[in-house]
Amino acid sequence: MQRLRFYGRRPEHPGEFLERCYLKPLKISQSRLAKELDISRRRVNEIVNGQRAITADTALRLAQYFHTTPMFWLEKQQLWELYQVGRNI
């Protein structure tokens, strides 16, 4: 069986991106974001800390709040997951 590898540099986890590009510059706390998205603070915290994936539901909520698209967030998550799997194959 041919080995599959993900080549390239480590992508940024979508939670890291969320914090770096949205939360910090806009001075939005994790608590405020959780309240605005109607999700738990724990969910936001786990995403930001790279311990939880961005699901379709979360992508829809983030897209609506930050005026992006759901695919924007899902593509970042998918790139992260491909990288992680590629490291272990």
Image: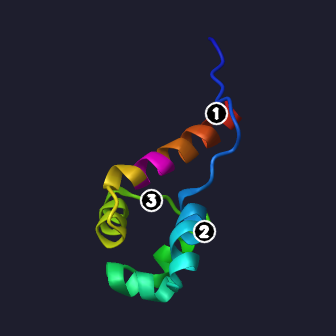
- Magenta part of the chain: 73-77
Dot 1 falls on a residue whose secondary structure is helix
Label 2: few (<14), some or many (≥20) within 10 Å?
Answer: few
| Residue depicted at 41% across the width and 82% down the height | 34
Earlier residue among tags 2 and 1: 2
In the displayed image of the protein, which residue is found farthest to the front?
25
Q: Is residue 7 magenta?
A: no
| Residue depicted at 49% across the width and 84% down the height | 28
Percent across and percent down for residue 13 are 59, 56
> Which residue is at the front of the view, 29 or 80?
29
Earlier residue among tags 3 and 2: 2
Dot 3 falls on a residue whose secondary structure is loop
Magenta segment, principal secondary structure? Answer: helix
Q: Which residue is mark 2?
A: 20
Mark 2 and 1 residues: CB-CB less than 8 Å, in contact?
A: no
Q: Which residue is mark 1?
A: 86
Going by the numbered disc 2, the residue's amino acid type is Arg
Q: Which residue is mark 3?
A: 54
Which quarter shows the N terminus?
top right
Percent across and percent down for residue 84 are 63, 42
Tell me how far mark 3 sits from mark 2, CA to CA. Answer: 16 Å
Tell me how far mark 2 sits from mark 1, CA to CA. Answer: 25 Å
Going by the numbered disc 1, the residue's amino acid type is Gly
Earlier residue among tags 1 and 3: 3
